[in-house]
Amino acid sequence: MTVPDFDAPVETMWEGKWIVAKRQGRWEYVARARGIQAAVILAVDDADHVLLVEQYRVPLGQRCLELPAGLIGDEHEGDTPHAAAIRELEEETGYRADRIEELGKFFSSPGMVSEGFTLLRARGLTRVGPGGGVAGEDITVHRVACSEIGDFVAAKREAGVAMDVKLLLLLAQDWLA
């Protein structure tokens, strides 16, 4: 099978501090600048509660419910998914993990965005601070029983909160039953 435009040159149409708009043949897509990637953390405590964060997202014009996450390599040279997960989990949620395991790399919208994220699972959680992110992030932390995630998401959606696609990870089991 021949893939159209796979060998066409890549052109940069526009570049900002954080993102780059590119064209390759007939395709236009967005990439992270400087090869930055993301670490997304699935943090489940010993009582079977998952940590979620809610914050305002300018592109959506509303608050969004998400798994904790952060950029890899945006400010820390030699950064790794594991190091970013440790840092971002504590910064966003106020929890520290005894164990973090890498679950793999995923792409959320591969027809439009080349950005991928590494999913990591955090276990052995201990609350060490308030969370909420760094200045200006205004992150609300939610600790939700895994058995109640469907109802929690439905209530947040009803309240006008957007849902990050990665929440499908938590909802899929109920939907596939």
Image (tube, rainbow, N blue to C red):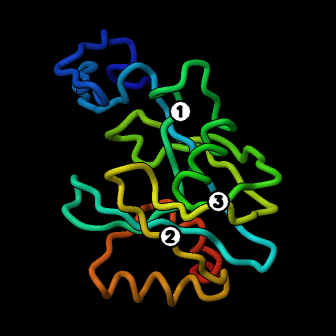
Image point (57%, 82%), residue name: 149
Amino acid type at mark 3 = Leu
Q: Label 1 vs label 2: CA separation?
A: 21 Å
Relative horizontal placement of residue 81, taking residue 37 as reference (left or right): right
Q: Which mark is residue 148?
A: none
Image quadrant containing the C terminus = bottom right
Q: Which mark is residue 72?
A: 1
Q: Which mark is residue 141?
A: 2
Image point (19%, 62%), residue name: 61
Give the class, few, some or many, for how many residues have Cα within 10 Å of label 3's Cα (few <14, many ≥20).
Answer: many
Q: Which mark is residue 42?
A: 3
Question: Could you say which is closer to the camera, residue 13 or residue 101?
Answer: 101
Amino acid type at mark 2 = Val
Relative horizontal placement of residue 3, taking residue 16 as reference (left or right): right
Q: Return the disc, 3 or 2, that comes first in the chain's sequence.
A: 3
Amino acid type at mark 1 = Ile
Secondary structure, mark 1, is: strand
Secondary structure, mark 2, is: strand
Image point (59%, 65%), residue name: 169
Give the class, few, some or many, for how many residues have Cα within 10 Å of label 2's Cα (few <14, many ≥20).
Answer: many
Where is residue 78? Give x, y as percent: 61, 19
Image point (40%, 19%), residue name: 34
Secondary structure, mark 3, is: strand
Query: Nearer the viewer's eye, disc 3 or disc 2?
Result: 2
Question: Could you say which is closer to the camera, residue 128 or residue 162?
Answer: 128
Q: Label 3 vs label 1: CA separation?
A: 16 Å
Above-or-below relation of 70 to 62: above
Where is residue 37? Give x, y as percent: 49, 33
Question: Could you say which is closer to the camera, residue 15 or residue 9?
Answer: 15
Where is residue 123? Give x, y as percent: 78, 60
Q: Label 3 vs label 2: CA separation?
A: 14 Å
